[in-house]
Image (spheres, coloured by chain):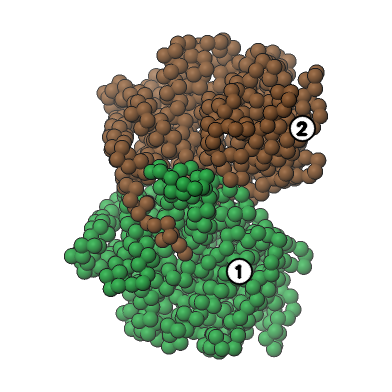
Chain colours: A green, B brown
Amino acid sequence: MSQCLSKPKANGCYLFQPSPKTEVDSMPEYKAPLRDIKFVMNELLNSEQHYANLEGAEDATPDMVDAIIQEGAKFCEQVLSPLNQVGDQEGCTWSEDGVKTPTGFKEAYQQYVEGGWPSMTADPNYGGQGLPHSIGLVVSEMVGTSNWSWGMYPGLSHGATNTIEEHGTEEQKQTYLTKLISGEWTGTMCLTEPHCGSDLGTLRTKAEPNADGTYSITGTKIFISAGEHDMAENIVHIVLARLPGAPEGTKGISLFIVPKQLPNEDGSAGERNAVSCGSLEHKMGIHGNATCVMNFDGAKGWLIGPENKGLNCMFTFMNTARIGTAIQGLGAAELGFQGSLAYAKDRLAMRSLSGPKNPDGIADPIIVHPDVRRMLLTQKVVAEGARALIYLAGQQVDVVHSGKTEEERKHADALLGFLTPIAKAFLTEIGYESANLGMQVFGGHGFITEWGMEQNVRDSRIGMIYEGTTGIQALDLLGRKVLMTQGEALKVFTKQVHVFCKENADNEQLKEFIEPLAAINKEWGDLTMKVGMTAMKNREEVGAAAVDYLMYSGYAVFAYLWARMAKVALDKMADGTSEEMFYNAKVQSARFYFKRLLPRTKTHAETMLAGSDSLLDMPEEAFAI
Amino acid sequence: MSQCLSKPKANGCYLFQPSPKTEVDSMPEYKAPLRDIKFVMNELLNSEQHYANLEGAEDATPDMVDAIIQEGAKFCEQVLSPLNQVGDQEGCTWSEDGVKTPTGFKEAYQQYVEGGWPSMTADPNYGGQGLPHSIGLVVSEMVGTSNWSWGMYPGLSHGATNTIEEHGTEEQKQTYLTKLISGEWTGTMCLTEPHCGSDLGTLRTKAEPNADGTYSITGTKIFISAGEHDMAENIVHIVLARLPGAPEGTKGISLFIVPKQLPNEDGSAGERNAVSCGSLEHKMGIHGNATCVMNFDGAKGWLIGPENKGLNCMFTFMNTARIGTAIQGLGAAELGFQGSLAYAKDRLAMRSLSGPKNPDGIADPIIVHPDVRRMLLTQKVVAEGARALIYLAGQQVDVVHSGKTEEERKHADALLGFLTPIAKAFLTEIGYESANLGMQVFGGHGFITEWGMEQNVRDSRIGMIYEGTTGIQALDLLGRKVLMTQGEALKVFTKQVHVFCKENADNEQLKEFIEPLAAINKEWGDLTMKVGMTAMKNREEVGAAAVDYLMYSGYAVFAYLWARMAKVALDKMADGTSEEMFYNAKVQSARFYFKRLLPRTKTHAETMLAGSDSLLDMPEEAFAI
């Protein structure tokens, strides 16, 4: 399959069938924002240079990358986007025989597999194409924005793929990894149990050794995305469980591979294992994805990685998984923007406050109204800023895996660890806000299902919860990443910002961005010091400050990215360009960001220092109705 | 029926059947927050004195008010609350024969009618009990929090009732008002058309005079809540339409009564009129309420109020309708708080940052975590602050209707006009935020339907849209109410605040509230001046500043109300009380408000002055994908 990708236009491997027309009106249509994707990759983040510096990324030539993105865009626009509302409205259905996914999902997955997409960034020794992870993120963005529920099926496979790639034995890799990489089988991550989510130390699923070296896995897992479905012939579950006599808490958890069907000698899917989907959850959104209760009734499993080190094994790819979830925030903002922009240009209501702009019509298009523009620009600036942040993080993932020097790899790892909780929590929060603004632009029509905006709100709401809630991410950022390193992780980033500000201190055109950026960068460090000081006296202060600290950090990171984007755009215009409108819009978007969104740091700066007393003084019994 | 209310415990008129058990798990159960309702009514707003000062409110004795609220609470807890999830899951169903409401809705409405509830605040000359509107708001709060979708049916009747009470002829009152007040018939407001919502000037529905003095109404109305259903024997539509040759725009709109069934000579519902429900909208939430497309095909209607003055007639009760919608924000916060509080006390996860609080359990209840408390306290403070604001507004409604002097009535009208857009937009915005926090406390379980938290998010999302979006309310506040009166409307309020601050300037215990309140009160005036100055040069500045101005105003109003509530609580504790816990929680809630929520004004203060350039400079074509 990898030969398809290296000759994308040659033999039709990338060709696909547009989805069949369904009864559901497929508003809103997704258009891959290719111009902005290229702006961020090539003009902001200089991907060509970046890929050239990586070990073994020779295939990631500009032409190749461009071809992949073009083909990915077509697949998302023509196959996945039309299935987005179908998935929401049909949902998944459970029966004794298994779970049925919505109309068209299975066929779309078949095309995805035939196109070679599952193998793109995987290990070439097991059928992968070994392309850099950052390219995978660009494709994930388009897949996730056009149809998040569908995208979760291959998305979960990535988790299983990465785990086995990193910790599996050679035999496990030959058996499972090859099938996951080809896409013939899909994967899941089975962590959560009814009584425990983030607090995995309390999990109860048991793994008892069998005589043949395998294990009998018994327990109930909930919220298992893609836990059961009809899209692939087998499902590989990665399950957290406890060995007999394992230490209590997080130090007694081991990882197991538990396939839905046991592999035959020839590698095909054989006899059914004792694992089944007990029921599907009814939920607010992502209806097209099957969220399963999974029952393991003495299912046969194989230990993967060392005994009792299961959580450590999970941590190795947790950054990637969280960046993957951060994409949901980007997608929510992009989809909301695309939908509400079209509506705002089309819908006529009221006259502009400064006089009619559409005098021949019964009213002006609502895009003339300042508050409608505030809502549109917020979504635009969130989507484009999120893209910059995620692609930047993606480059760090690349360097962590394939950087040429130890120093490069360590630096990228520190930066990635710092950016990950920010990207995950901040982007899903402001992405959800953006989805709500996209709906708000529609007025009453936004509440109506057919326009797709309320689905975007419902689907994106989960982003702030799974893969660790905003509160959990905030503790990770402030507690583990910043305070436990005495601020080193923060400095890795603020130093970059400082250098950028210094380099551009004399640039008059950039002054409106550089001055507030430098001020924020300094304040960020000062605030960190202050929070750190109070936290040394009272650890509760970390919990009391964390979410505000994280949100502040998000706006600070965005300030840096928007200032850099403004610089690129101003430089392009100074050099002369036929795309004046595009670059000018970038500068104006940056201006909007600094004037309208960055001031949110004022509130967070104050509330993060408000102390834990106002939260903890009230006795538990006083919380009452 | 009015005799039932005057002897609430005597003859069983108020008794009702608890709803039958249904298959749906009825989480979360609603508990009417009676202690807080009494705190706001009696201790904060001194209702006894207030009612004694009104004309014709002799029946509103403390015992009577108390009995009404107690009985209302039981009805909401035992009848309406169990139907809330049923309504969401079943929704309404359309057929040729009409619209069927969810199981139990019709029976609950029957009990509501038998209990005399529809007549509570209506004109005694037509069967009403003439109780003050503010009491109706308290009942509406409980009804709306326990089951918003159900509450909209009688809620819409109020609109029709008020219109006919105010503008109908004696004959129209005898025919329709009596039936609406008894609850035998329900009402609707038919304003919106497919191409126009807020911009009613462009509406197209026609009213052509018939020889007999009636009119033939033809056109399509959309988003008609409670437009068709099976709960009452007839439905009275109040319809906006244009007479032949009427002036264009808002000055050519007239109001018509269009009953679903034409009244017989004896007052009963007779022949079917040419009005029908074409379809039901599929929507994000409030599934239990029928949102109808209504087709008028030459339906017989009667003019109500003067020709071409339809919009003016609507304005007379728009404040009441908007305060009614503001209740949705209060309800969302209350319901989220009740659900997430129970969960936070029950769910065990992680250990407290300062050491185990539940050492014998596998983990601590999540209410020990500062960020969980931040989310709980936000909801609590929003719900209780919203209650104070709505009841305060309700008292102004009472005075506008029944104040003894012209001066009192004028003052109340100015204050009500000022508070209305704030209550409507600010409370639905922060109510929605609270509903989302209620869901967030549950982690992954929040996304699951059975817990009820995601329904609360979906149901409350519409609050920011209907009855005028947040953007529309903001223009009403800043443009019409504040700037057009040269700030007089603002002064009506800030003067009260100023007096309160002065009176309590020497109170050491209150200092932590009074000082920031006085500062906000001053800044509010200063900001208004600044916005006003820029708006004089460029009207677009009003649109650019309006939403931030409104949100700022909301937080300022809350600061005043929370300072007053803290004072009441501190006074009670100084006097000695057996309810130390309750009053102490009030003071701590006020402290939380001032430390954690009021700082949001910092951001709004800055962004409201950010100017319109960052919104309007970008050419429309530059908004592109």
Q: Which disc is residue B273 wearing?
A: 2
Number of marks present in the image shown: 2
Reading the image, the residue beneath label 1 is: A80
Mark 2 is on which residue type?
A: Asn
What is the crowding at mark 2: few (fewer than 14 residues within 10 Å), some, or many (at least 20)? some
Whether residue A431 is visible: yes
The span from disc 1 to disc 2 (Cα, nearest Å) is 47 Å
Q: Is residue A315 above or below residue B45?
A: below
B576 left or right of A559 in image: right
Q: Which of marks 1 and 2 is in front?
A: 2
Could you tell me residue A441's position as x and y percent? 50, 49
User: In what quadrant of the picture does the N terminus of chain A appear?
Assistant: bottom right
Give me the residue at 59% from left, 56% from top: A452
Whether residue B317 is visible: no
When asked about the image quadrant of residue A215, the answer is bottom right
Question: What chain is tagged by disc 2?
Answer: B
